[in-house]
Image (cartoon, rainbow, N blue to C red):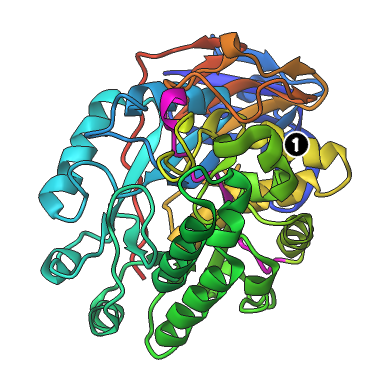
Amino acid sequence: MNSVIIKNGTIVNEGKSRKGDVLIVDDKIAATGHIEADSIPRDTLSIDAEGCFVIPGIIDVHVHLREPGLTHKADIFTETKAAVAGGVTSFMDMPNTIPHTTTLNAINEKFSLARDKSLINYSFYLGAINSNLNEILNADPETICGIKIFLGASTGDMILTDEKIIREIFSRTNLLVACHCEDESIIRGNINAFREKYGENLSPEFHPMIRSRDACFNATSFIIKIAAEYDVRLHILHISTADEIKLFTGEVPPEAKKLTSETCIHYLWFDDSDYKRLGNHIKWNPAIKTRFDRDALIKAVNHDLIDIISTDHAPHTEEEKKETYFKAPSGGPMLQHSLVAMMELYHRGMISAEKIVEKMCHNPAKIYRIKNRGFIREGYKADICILNPDSPWTVKKDNILYKCKWSPFEGINFRSRVEYTIVNGVIVYNNGIINDSHRGEKLLFNIK
């Protein structure tokens, strides 16, 4: 029997913060609250969490771990090492790898890679293209987290804009459909106009004008309108504009919604004034937009118009990011720093610790219907992060764990620090020491 007792921490869970203990036996949470000594198994490892927050492990529903095919940028092993240093215990990976994850054979290959290499729990999206409806209809809803549709091209060339095929998918799938919403025709028109005016050496400051707010709103409106005709669960990924917020409601519990939404750490942290300093290092698709948009997104998170906060962790090498604007790929690494970045907003009085846990732990479990994870509850899997809210540190090259070895947060002083990350009852991260022999489990989903 493996057992751990977490003592004296502040448990942040299900909208409340309270002082208490958490007992883990094997891979599950055995008890919470005030736990008497005579109910603790002999030889239980004790962790004193005095002054720390004890929260469920972060579930990141939107990552690009680059394996297979793009492992010069990242791979499942390196990025899940970075993840445990950031309190992340589960991920859902996108299909724009090489080859694209558009067949069941390809997704099974990813599951095999994760089984052998991932320190944390995992699932994968099946990408939708013009020709793979049969693959989608045969996807296992107990193990595959969802279907991914790219309405706008991003890294790779996956894109699906044929309304007839989209309708066919919506009418027949019983999986959640996650959508990257940018209008490709608007983007192409903007690219041509800016190229004609400025040539190839365009400043990254023009990125939010090319991947414009109209491109986002038009595509998001388009897909929501179609989905409303079908009994489909539609999740809109990486909301970046204030305009899109009005398309969502906060009046329904997330588990009951057919339409849900997500924003990402970079949209809550950066704005378009940061392009001058960081350039292509904050080039994401959709683009980071204005301070007005950033503030509106934070407000929408607090008012439950946005349901999930994810990372869109999408590493590229520094050499790739140093290319000219049109050649530099979009995306950047975020897994290691997502929780501490959100905690910085907590320290600034912009969001509560309870709301952070709701958006990064509880709601991913609710919306994706993950079995027995995302909460500190008796009988649930013991995926737990112990976070010290008052332990300052600075992001530097020598403490970045991503394979690409850079971060847009370099030089930032964070006031919070992850001390422990526990995955399925095993301490995988302990104050800078990583148990890289541990392997996570396949996420399982409830079929309703």
Chief secondary structure of the magenta span?
loop
The quadrant of the image that shows the C terminus is bottom left
User: What percent of the width, then of the height, locates residue 222?
Assistant: 46, 82
Indicate the quadrant where residue 116 lies.
top left
The quadrant of the image that shows the N terminus is top left
The residue beneath circle 1 is 343
Residue count near mark 1 (Cα–Cα under 10 Å), binned few <14, some 14–19, many ≥20: many
Q: Is residue 79 left or right of residue 442?
A: right
The residue drawn where x is 64% and y is 34% is 278
Q: Is residue 177 left or right of residue 204?
A: left
The residue drawn where x is 52% and y is 47% is 284
In magenta, the rendered stretch is 304-320
SS of the residue at dot 1?
Answer: helix
Indicate the quadrant where residue 23 lies.
top right
Is 309 drawn above or below residue 447 in the view shown? Answer: above
Q: Nearer the viewer, residue 91 or 386?
A: 91
Q: Nearer the viewer, residue 351 or 444?
A: 351
The residue drawn where x is 54% and y is 28% is 24
Q: Is residue 13 visible?
A: no
Say if the magenta span includes residue 121: no
Identity, as a three-letter code, of the amino acid under mark 1 = Met
User: What percent of the width, then of the height, locates residue 408?
Assistant: 62, 30
User: What percent of the width, then of the height, locates residue 273?
Assistant: 74, 45
Indicate the quadrant where residue 446 lies.
bottom left
Is 138 drawn above or below residue 63 in the view shown? Answer: below
Q: Is residue 272 visible?
A: yes
